[in-house]
Amino acid sequence: MSRHNLAVQRREDLIPVVAQLIQELPKPEQLVLSLYVVEGLTFPEVGTVLDVPEDRVWQLYSGAMHHLHTQLSAWRAEIQEPIVSERAAIFDPRSL
């Protein structure tokens, strides 16, 4: 598998994970992400829609991104640990 194909596969593997993590966010954070990322609104426009100040939109967005980053890092560590363990077993000199 080429490096490009591997990167595409990893990205495709992330889609359901990110979708699930977004569903676990508090509703205001979900709304901000939806309006900003999906609908393409600016932060001032999101603030108008949600009837909150722009700085509150930034707080919600930052909180959502922090949560997603933290959860994705944990997920990544979980899926890489078995790979590292398998490699360690393969290259363990005691196994020779």
Image (cartoon, rainbow, N blue to C red):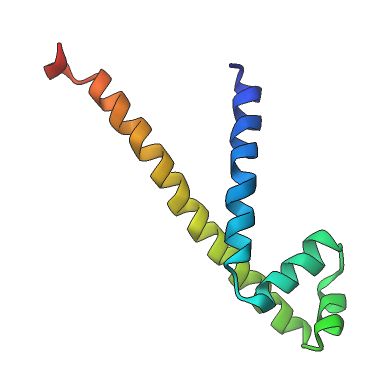
Rendered image quadrant of residue 22: bottom right
Viewport quadrant of the C terminus: top left
Give the number of marks: 0
- Residue 49: x, y in percent? 86, 81
Rendered image quadrant of residue 12: top right
User: Image check: 70 left or right of 25?
Assistant: left
Name the residue at 59% across, 57% down.
Answer: 20
Name the residue at 81% across, 69% down.
Answer: 35
Name the residue at 82% across, 76% down.
Answer: 46
User: Image check: 67 left or right of 59?
Assistant: left
Name the residue at 69% across, 70% down.
Answer: 30
Relative to 54, residue 93 above or below:
above
User: Image check: 88 left or right of 41?
Assistant: left
- Residue 85: x, y in percent? 29, 32
- Residue 4: x, y in percent? 65, 24
Q: Residue reaching furthest left?
A: 94
Residue 41 versus residue 13: which sits nearer the camera? 13
- Residue 86: x, y in percent? 31, 27
Relative to 18, residue 42 above or below:
below
Relative to 53, residue 33 above or below:
above
Viewport quadrant of the N terminus: top right
Relative to 58, residue 77 above or below:
above
Residue 27 versus residue 2: which sits nearer the camera? 27
